[in-house]
Image (cartoon, coloured by chain):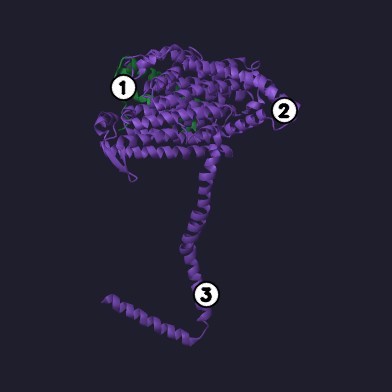
Chain colours: A green, B purple
Amino acid sequence: MFFLQSFILIILLPLLGSIVAGLGSFLIGRKGAALVTVSLMLISNFLSYIAYYYVIFKSHICYINLFT
Amino acid sequence: MIVVVGTVSTLVHMYSYGYMSGDPHLSRFMSYLSFFTFFMLMLVTADNFIQLFLGWEGVGLCSYLLIGFWSTRIQANKSAIKALILNKIGDFGVLIAIVLVFLVFQSVDFSTVFALVPFFFNKTVFFLFWEVNVVTLICFLFFIGAVGKSAQLGLHTWLPDAMEGPTPVSALIHAATMVTAGVFLIIRCSPLFEYSPTMLSVITFVGALTAFFAATAGTVQNDLKKVIAYSTCSQLGYMVFSCGLSGYAVSLFHLANHAFFKALLFLSAGCVIHSLSDEQDMRRMGGLVKLLPLTYTLFLIGTLALTGFPFLTGFYSKDVILEIAYTHYSVSSLFSYWLGTLTAGFTAFYSFRLLYLTFLSENNAYKSVMKNVHESSWIMVLPLMVLVFGSIFVGYLAKDLFLGLGSDAFLNSIFVHPKNLIFIDAEFIPYHIKLIPLAFSFGGIFLCFFFYSFLLKLEYFWFNAYNNKNLNIVKVHHFLYKFYNKKWFFDTVYNLFIGYPLLKFGYNVTFKLMDKGVIEFFGPYGLSLLGYESSFFMKTNYMRGNLKFYVQFMVLFTVFILFFITILSV
């Protein structure tokens, strides 16, 4: 059930990665930016598998309300 | 859908770390990619039309940024702006549709709107002085958006040109995720589309025509990536016409499968391009099977999955689409069935032509290029391995989940009107009918090898032997080649009848007549000229040091001023 709360991270982690890589690349460098985006995408992807399990196999009805 | 987007996106992130590692703007590239992923996830998780539209616009923007990533190349910039403009036409349709939805249903929430559709399907509304069914109109406008985003016939010209961007971008945006946003929109709005039989048949026709057009145009393209782009276009046609036949689940299934094998194809094509020092023309490749055995293996699996080789991923979804097209028994479905089956043959033809010219035929590349050919680094190959597993097994594993009768995977998010429910009938069509697409695929493969290893040489031999340019087979071949290679002259027609007149209008009317003419004349330039000219006129005619004139003017203007003061004070 803890994971159900964290589904919003699926959407927001790529945004975070984008901001860090785009605006903070002078701090972390080329390779660092790539590393940050790739690792955040991996976490987001992992969470999306969990969401898949809950929604498709367990038939949860799940809405992600994003600032609306 | 989140899983598809997330998986492909992650793999492409990893791949582009290897692919773009020499680029000084790697961080900007990764930032754009992540930004794109954010918008795409936002689009697919939206629970109302506004959020969907935000994601929709966002992916268009990111597509523009990523196509024009190498912004010093004029061709990349041109393609980027072309993609943006053609997408914008579609976006306009979506925007009007959302406004109409709000006007009719007083809500933009998916659940509210879809619950209310059955009460509104006979309502009419005046649009452009026409009285039209409101559900049909909304569906039509959404479909325009889907046509723009999913590169259906009419607004498809941006997709092949979008291949100017880096290869990971082509794989992520123009094969796996963004171009499927249009199909996703149709699937998501299935309760709307189900109540509009007119639009369903329109979708079927457009989708089938797109599939056929793109497959034929893809057969004779010479750019490695453009062939795969046309193949994407053609597969999107499949998805769209299966939506038109109410097979939303199978359309989504094909979308997921297509994301896997098309990303695999694009990324392994990227490996080939990378190892050949950015050479994209297939005519300057060949014989790479001995130098790049691993890439060849990956490419072969992707190609087989695309052509619908039995028990690979593409087989499970494509054949089901054609089966339901056969079972529907209407004019549009018969049309789409035969075009789809022909397309399966063409698909096999161009896929294996790609494979043959790149890997199997005699080598045509430069020696300096061939000396540096190398397999890609592990960070580029690792995502490909995952995609290979996806391309082989996903179709088999997810078949019952997506298509199984009574599968509750989608709950109520996909609605099929009971009148249009044909999945059961599709199971009971004769066995030999089910084999027809397969036969066409194998025919295409055979024809490709026959054509490229035998017939072209024979034709060349005839051409030399008779020394006669009027040989009929050469003429026919030349005509077909020119027609298909120029993409049925779509770009030419657009440029001649839309682009060029608009450009002329922009130069002659809005620029020369309006900006430089009317506004400039009555605006800044004219005003300053007026002051200058009038003072010059006064100086030459009156201000000649004649005291009598000065006194006259002084008196005249004093009287005028006194007159105005009296008028104003009254």
Q: Specify the subunit that label 2 lies on.
A: B
Numbered disc in front, either 3 or 2 = 2
Identified by mark 3, the residue type is Phe
Q: Which residue shows up at 62% across the image and 15% down it?
A: B293
- Within 10 Å of disc 2 (Cα), the crowding (few <14, some 14-19, many 20+) is some
| Residue that carries the numbered disc 3 in the rendered image | B536
On the question of residue B181 being in view, the answer is: no
Residue A26: give its label: none
Q: CA distance from mark 3 to mark 1?
A: 79 Å
**Marks 3 and 1 on same chain:** no
Q: Specify the subunit that label 1 lies on.
A: A
Q: Which residue shows up at 40% across the image and 18% down it?
A: A46
Query: Residue B286: horizontal and vertical position, in percent?
Result: 66, 21
| Residue that carries the numbered disc 2 in the rendered image | B463
Identify whether B531 is placed above or below B322.
Answer: below
Q: CA distance from mark 1 to mark 2?
A: 71 Å
| Residue that carries the numbered disc 1 in the rendered image | A5
| Quadrant into which the N terminus of chain B falls | top left
Query: Residue B84: horizontal and vertical position, in percent?
Result: 47, 38
Query: Residue A27: horizontal and vertical position, in percent?
Result: 49, 31
